[in-house]
Amino acid sequence: MYERLERLSDQAVDDLNKLIAQLSRHPKVMRREHFQRLLDEQALFVARDGERIVGCVEVAVDVVPSKVKGWLEELMVDDDYRGRGIARVLVRMAVDYARQEGCVHLNLTSGGDRGTAHAVYEALGFYQRDSSVYRLDL
């Protein structure tokens, strides 16, 4: 089952933290209030196997003076569920949401070592931009 996550349960917090642990080299446990803020301010789409969350993607919508743009963030699928098309469905849901919100583009960043993810993004119409990403660690 696929849905936009509207309510946060203890099980959802646990499941999301398990996904983060699989994705990140240096995972940090996110607190319930951080996930609640995400649900209040952005859109989080999830894939479920029964009650368990086995995949998710966030869409952040930024309104800036010149446009409305979207950011696809944190596409994660449980290791045991990869290769089943879950990521593709979640990304399509994110794209539909971004269109409904009036976004002119949907951006994402992806690590250079994530070739499988890059193939999924490209198959869904994303392309690599010639740009530089800058970061300030806080």
Image (tube, rainbow, N blue to C red):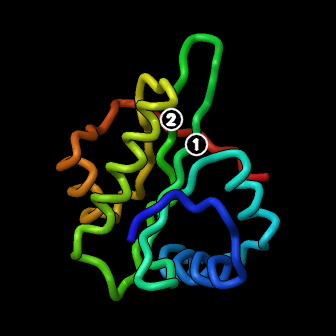
Callout 2 environment at 10 Å: few (<14), some (14 to 19), or many (20+)? Answer: many
Amino acid at circle 2: Gly
**Helix, strand or loop status at disc 2:** strand
Q: Tell me where residue 76 sits by quadrant.
A: bottom left
Q: Position of residue 93 (x, y in %)?
A: 38, 50
Frontmost residue, 74 versus 4: 4
Q: Residue at x 32, y 63 (%)?
A: 87
Frontmost residue, 131 versus 80: 80
Measure how far apart labels 1 and 2 are at the Cα level: 6 Å
Q: Residue at x 41, y 83 (%)?
A: 49
Q: Earlier in the sequence, mark 1 or mark 2?
A: 1
**How many numbered marks appear?**
2
Rendered view: 126 above or below 8? above
Q: Is residue 5 left or right of residue 28?
A: left
Q: Position of residue 34 (x, y in %)?
A: 77, 63
Q: Is residue 82 left or right of residue 35?
A: left
Amino acid at circle 1: Ala
Q: Position of residue 129 (x, y in %)?
A: 33, 33
Rendered image: mark on residue 70:
2
Query: In the rendered image, which quarter contains the N terminus?
Result: bottom left
Q: Tell me where residue 82 sits by quadrant.
A: bottom left
